[in-house]
Image: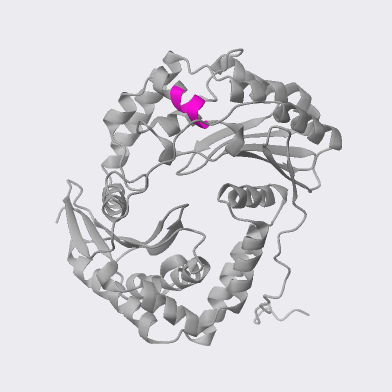
Amino acid sequence: MIDRKKGPEIKSDFDLELKGVQATRLPNGLEFLESNAGTQNIIKIELVYRTGRIHERQRAVAKAALSLIREGSTRHSSEELAELYDFYGAVVKSAAGMETSTISLVVVERYFEKIWPIWLHMVFYPQYDQDEIDKYCQVVSSKFVNQLAKNDVQGYRKLTEEIFGADHPYGYNTEVADIQALTRDNILHYYNENFGLDTALVVLSGRYSAETRDRIKADLGTKQRQHQSPEPQFPEKPLFQKTYTIQTDNDVQVAIKYGRKLFDRLHPDYTSVSFLNTILGGYFGSRLMKNIREEKGYTYGIYSAVHGWQRDGFLYISADVANEYVDATLSEIHKEMAILREELVPTEELEMVRNYLLGQSLHLLDGPFAKGELIKNLASKNRTVQDFNKSIQKFKSIQSEEIREMAQRYLTEDTFVTVLAGSL
């Protein structure tokens, strides 16, 4: 009989290697990655372009180009596309990120032949109808104004602007006027410049037949389009310490944003610092949560995060607190950073975080679409399967001495920028 008073044994020796990925190069140079797995005949096709906000000539154009690509092609209107996708149970999504843009199709394989040519034409021949652009600008501007009323949003925008610079691709801020200034000409120009197949990749996942795979390869392999956008410039800005205050009308709480510039995602310390960040504030049982939320009660939630891109990255801590707790919260953040610099992480805590991160990594391999998403994220970020497997091995092997060394190197207060947004 199972003893319900005793928890299950925690193990970390399970297989976490990413396997079964097939990679080929199509005749036109397009990178083709696939993982044929699963029990249901549902397929997901993702076309990933290595372009995003960093390639904008006009601010706000990248997100607009990707959002509006679903709103009509030269053959079908927005309403017709929506009706066709709905009829065949297809899910079509598009999104523009900082450095990559993705257009995806999920469909039951038996309807693939019906929906594939419609989706493919939409991707390569978007209409960008002016009426759709006008509606997009109106809706997005309204949502954007609401977002800018939040202390949290204003604080984050100021933090990234100061860390990287107001003219840096990672640091500049889009304004409402930028959205309202969008036209069909500059959206088309962005599309034609950046949506080349020479820097793109395709990820096919799910369960599918050889005939379906060959059809996708044949159709995509004959397309010809080269990207023409110039390489973005990334001006350097040194590390510094400074505090900025943003006065707002929102007097309920003050948003604290506390961060520093780090390095790109291929840096040798990236995985180790990610482990350190988890201990500091990267999960619900982190030190910042236990101290500032559970023990002190200064905030409902506090967290830290590491973002790594092609050329740079940053670490930041975020919390919303009442005015009277701002100084005390910052003091406790500094205290937790100092402890990590000076003391070794206890074995019990180290193993708990190790198991947490390995469990999170296991989710990345749970199911064919999750595996496809992982493959896409690795390839689009110029990382390999071997890089992923090395990260897993680092999670399994890292020790307290290395964590303390990372804290001494990257958690020094004289390199952090503080932004306080609220009615101070």
Taking 414 as reference, is 136 left or right?
right
Q: Residue 263, image x and y in percent?
A: 42, 61
Q: Residue 338, image x and y in percent?
A: 32, 80
Quarter location, residue 201: top right
Front-most of residues 314 and 285: 314
Taking 189 as reference, is 393 left or right?
right
Which residue is drawn at the image coordinates 41% and 18% (left, top)?
185
Front-most of residues 75 and 223: 223
Front-most of residues 289 and 96: 96
Q: Would you say residue 137 sits in the magenta stretch? A: no
Q: Is residue 423 above or below residue 303?
A: above
**Span shown in magenta:** 189-194
Q: Magenta region, mostly helix, strand or loop?
A: helix
Quarter location, residue 362: bottom right
Describe the colour scheme in one phrase: one colour
Image quarter of the C terminus: bottom left
Image quarter of the N terminus: bottom right
Which residue is drawn at the image coordinates 53% and 86% (left, top)?
347
Which residue is drawn at the image coordinates 34% and 77% (left, top)?
336
Q: Residue 103, image x and y in percent?
A: 58, 34
Taking 207 as reference, is 137 left or right?
left
Q: Residue 237, image x and y in percent?
A: 29, 56
Quarter location, residue 286: bottom left
Q: Is residue 220 above or below residue 418?
A: above
Taking 99 as reference, is 335 left or right?
left
